[in-house]
Image (tube, grey):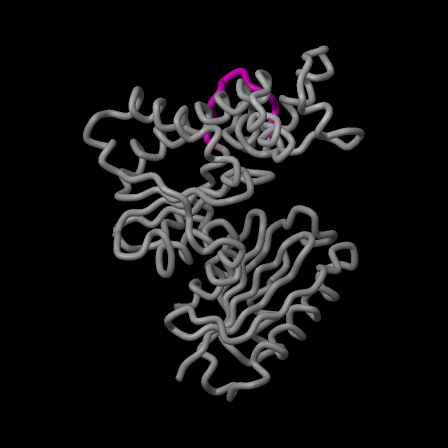
Amino acid sequence: MKYVVGVDLGGTQLRAVLIDRDADLLAYQRTDTAAECGPTAVIAQIEQLITMVTAQVDRQDVVGIGVGTPGPLDPFDGIVLEAPNLAGWINVPLKALLQERTGLPVTVGNDANAAGLGEWRFGSGRGCQDFVYVTISTGIGGGVIAQGKLLLGSKGMAGEVGHMTIQMDGPLCGCGNFGCWEVVASGTALARTAQGALERGHQSLIKEIAASSPVEGWHIAAAAERGDTLAQTLMRREGELIGVGLVNLLHLYSPERIALGGGVTKSIAHWEPYMRSVVEERAMLPYRTATINLATLGDNVGVIGAAALVL
Ligand SMILES: [Zn+2]
């Protein structure tokens, strides 16, 4: 039996799994990321989790370790160029450092790319050659499988779907551009738009549901559920904005399937019809045969995707 380790390095949580070639989960460990303590401390945490998930198997049967990391990186040399929410992570040669410490081959990839790879191999994209995975949560990320391969581009940074411009004069994005998909349609954007409307005096159940805490996506979904006009308008807009981005992806990559994941998809019932209408109205006819569905790996997509980087 051969095994693979997957590690999902997040700003708040660090998770690791041991899977076999069918993605059966054999061991799972997680810990809070020592995000403020710098790369050396976090790499020691990763090493510890790897030791824990491989404790029950012969190390010789472990084929390799895949690590999904946030932010820009060089997947060819395994260098994390920058990791948002992780202090001091600038140009960290993660692949070399982990290989040295574990004696196993290491592959490093962008977390959303890895998730896309995981969904393609083991989830919603299984069996197709051209597939796009989009995760809509605090940001928007994705992974593109083109002709049976993860699309990396010349620098290994392809597939940054969240930074397609959707509104030329839209709000400023964290990347420095304006009106990116992420800054108009992520969960953060949805909450910010709701907060702005409330501050301008819109009456809404969102205010009551959120009480004194900042507005979150689920507050809006809960208000929409109860027939709240503002919440329903926001959900409609959310669906339309997601739809516009998906039309771009259909035209760019001509996938057989698109899968949607991330926290915002929990409220898909409220925005899906608007998303589909936009796709029907705006995508050129031959592209519309692509199916658009929910991703299937759920919370494990990050770690399974990371492991899929090795397979
Ligand atoms: Zn951007």
For image coordinates 21% across by 26% down, the residue present is 285
Q: Which residue is outermost to the top?
A: 201
x, y percentage for residue 310? 43, 68
The quarter of the rendered structure image containing the N terminus is: bottom left
Magenta span includes 171: yes
Name the magenta segment's main secondary structure. loop
Most foreground residue, 12 or 169: 12
Q: Give ligand 1's quarter of the image.
A: top right
Number of marks drawn: 0
Displayed quadrant of residue 272: top left
Q: Which residue is outermost to the front?
A: 226
Left or right, residue 14 beside residue 87: left
x, y percentage for residue 192? 65, 25
For image coordinates 50% across by 33% down, the residue present is 163
For image coordinates 69% across by 64% down, the residue present is 31
Indicate whether 66 appears above or below 147: below
Left or right, residue 35 beside residue 116: right
x, y percentage for residue 281? 30, 20
The quarter of the rendered structure image containing the C terminus is: bottom left
Indicate whether 268 appears above or below 8: above
Magenta span includes 59: no
Most foreground residue, 22 or 113: 22
For image coordinates 78% across by 54% down, the residue present is 36
Magenta stretch: give its range.
164-174
x, y percentage for residue 74? 51, 54
Displayed quadrant of residue 48: bottom right
